[in-house]
Amino acid sequence: MTAAGTRVAVVTGAGRGIGAAIARRLAGDGLAVMVSDIDPSTAQEVAQEITDAGGQAASTATDVADRDACSALVAATRERFGSIDVMVANAGIAQVKTLREVTPEDLQRMLGVNVGGVLWCLQAASEAMIEQGRGGKIINAASIAGHQGFDHLGHYSASKFAVRALTQAAAKELAGHQITVNAYCPGIVGTTMWDEIDQGLGGYLGTGKGEALAQYSQLIALGRVQTPEDVASFVSYLASRDADYMTGQAVMIDGGIVMV
Ligand SMILES: NC(=O)C1=CN([C@@H]2O[C@H](COP(=O)(O)OP(=O)(O)OC[C@H]3O[C@@H](n4cnc5c(N)ncnc54)[C@H](O)[C@@H]3O)[C@@H](O)[C@H]2O)C=CC1
Ligand SMILES: CC(=O)C(C)=O
């Protein structure tokens, strides 16, 4: 349980990268954080780091593609901290392939994690928030690739367009319960995901380690690769009461790659 008035957040895919930065940031903002990842050891490490720094955190292992596991994640959070006020559905995967090469298994996995994971977390969190009766905030990971289809990342892009659709529909369905639903759309963030994209693109472009990342980075108006903390500071706003009047939006936080 937390002290009265402490808000509680769940962050999925929080064992590393953007999710870990969001978990640290929300804990720094004073929220109690359930650090969740498919990898229990990294989730545990991030939670430990937060508690060592004086914050409140616990960890769980959750595969977001599993609907029952997402329900169990929310139940475990309420059991541990007493409520859930913010759900950050951050977990996601990428895969570099041309659309001509994507297999049914590739597509199923991509949609299972990136779309299923967002939907199952949304269902479990909104059910709990409605029962609690004081609203809440659901925040989903989209991408610049959810606004523009990227070559070699076609099925990934499709999954992120779907996240925008879910965000808009859920915002309309849940507004009457004072639950807001928004998404963040990062650009090119220096995480393991982009290390893997860089390697995958290398196979198509004939580029060596770091060269595809350098080529794509030329698209960034602000002239530097994004950090996970750049994303976390925006998610901090979305999770805060300052964002109470915002819902159904999928906002670019990309250093000026895609301008809409
Ligand atoms: N890195 C980038 O440039 C961008 C990332 N994004 C999105 O931001 C989110 C986070 O990305 P990164 O931190 O860069 O990725 P990452 O690959 O560095 O970290 C992803 C984390 O999610 C976990 N994960 C993977 N599958 C999971 C599952 N089925 N259930 C639970 N956890 C799972 C991994 O264990 C890992 O800890 C993703 O949704 C990604 O699509 C969006 C735009 C740009
Ligand atoms: C990983 C990702 O979303 C992009 C566009 O790089």
Image (cartoon, rainbow, N blue to C red):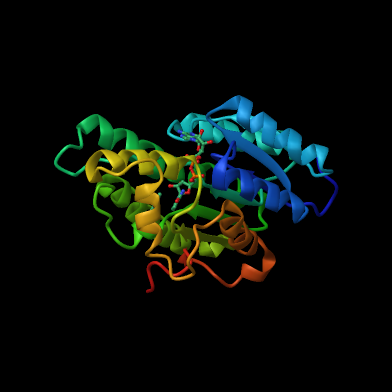
In which quadrant of the rendered image does the N terminus lie?
top right
Q: Is residue 71 left or right of residue 221?
A: right
In the rendered view, tell whether residue 94 sits above or below residue 149. above
Estimate the x, y position of residue 5 in percent, counting from the top left: 81, 54
| Residue 41, quarter of the rendered image | top right
Image quarter for residue 33? top right
Residue 123 or residue 104, whichever sits in front: 104
Report which quarter residue 57 is drawn in: top right
> Compared with residue 2, is residue 62 higher up or lower down, i.e. above or below?
above
Up the image or down, 179 lies above or below 57; here it is: below
Which quadrant of the rendered structure holds the C terminus? bottom left
Residue 100, percent across and down? 14, 41
- The reply to whether residue 125 is in sight is no
| Residue that protrudes farthest toward the left in the picture | 100
Count of marks, rendered view: 0
Q: Is residue 199 left or right of residue 58?
A: left
Q: Taking 213 as reference, is 16 above or below it?
A: above
Which residue corresponds to the image point at 25% horizontal and 49% vertical from the top-left?
154
Q: Residue at x 60, y 51 (%)?
A: 130
Task: Identify the residue at image location x=79%, y=52%.
Answer: 6
